[in-house]
Amino acid sequence: MSKDLRLISKEKEKKTIIKIADLKIGEDFIVIAGPCAVENERQTIETAIAVKEAGANMLRGGAFKPRTSPYAFQGLGLKGLKILEKAKQETGLPIVTEVIDSRDVSWISEYADVLQIGARNMQNFSLLKEVGKTDKPVLLKRGMYSTLKEWLSCAEYILSEGNPNVILCERGIRTFETYTRNTLDLSMVPAVKECTHLPVLVDPSHGTGKKSLIGPMSLAAIAAGSDGLIVEVHNNPEVALSDKEQQFNPAEFKAYMEKVLKLSEIMKQL
């Protein structure tokens, strides 16, 4: 890899373990689950309770949603963050939420346990620098057209500002294939582990865009060595305001988790 990747190089550091509450990301297998977007208090809290009961370790939920269309649901903003805070109080699950503007980093950090940088913002360098100045762990998703080197270079931006707690997330890349929403590039999981000491998660919800494919690709991600998964779950996906095709309902997620947790235990023994 490039000599410019000074801080993330596997040669220079021990494996990074990121502690959040009683979780150790990079050591424990973790599942982050929750709705694509925070729509209202009932939806979010009901979903949070369901994913906690099924075995999820953290709650995801978008209060700010960067959408392709300016007319699509953009999230509830501050109101959404306050709803996530209530869900955390109800369940004890740490919160993962996306930040899309460098001006919002400081006050979103008051609510979030992990700051997510989405695929569209992977190379938003002013945003990377700003989250690099915080003490919050950062979940950095791979851009949809990005190479491994470009992705790792963005992680280097965050580390170079003083924040060592970066979690990489493979979420699929754009290819000529149209059956799936993206092409989930699971080769990146062992590739990341060859190159860097940072933990890596997989997002099979965005990686496939199809509920029927999330389970098989999650199992494949575990077999590839992923440190965890981030999955979308909604208490009633049929009425979801975004990404309804790729969100599990609570019963589906419970069945999914039984397989995921079983395989993750098997992988620990190998």
Image: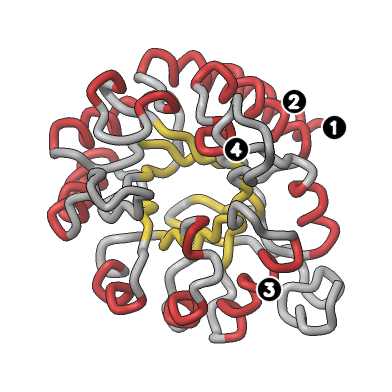
Image quarter (top left, top right, bottom left or bottom right) of the C terminus: top right
Q: In the rendered image, which quarter is residue 64 located in?
A: bottom left
Percent position (x, y) of residue 85? 21, 52
Secondary structure of the residue carrying tag 1 is loop
Q: Amino acid at mark 2?
A: Ile
Percent position (x, y) of residue 50? 32, 25
Q: Of discs 1 and 4, which sits in the foreground? A: 4
Measuring 60% from the left and 24% from the top, which residue is drawn there? 179
Secondary structure of the residue carrying tag 2 is helix
Q: Amino acid at mark 3?
A: Ser
Closer to the chain start, of discs 1 and 4, is 4
Q: Which residue is mark 4?
A: 182
Local crowd size for mark 1, using a 10 Å CA cut-off: few (<14), some (14–19), many (≥20): few
Closer to the chain start, of discs 4 and 2, is 4
Secondary structure of the residue carrying tag 3 is helix
Mark-to-mark CA distance, 2 and 3: 33 Å
Mark-to-mark CA distance, 1 and 4: 30 Å
Whether the residues at callouts 2 and 3 have beta carbons within 8 Å, the answer is: no
Q: Which residue is mark 3?
A: 153
Mark-to-mark CA distance, 2 and 1: 7 Å
Q: Amino acid at mark 1?
A: Leu
Q: How many marks?
A: 4
Q: Which residue is mark 1?
A: 270
For the question of whether residue 6 can be seen, the reply is yes
Percent position (x, y) of residue 59? 37, 43
Q: Which residue is mark 2?
A: 266
Closer to the chain start, of discs 2 and 3, is 3
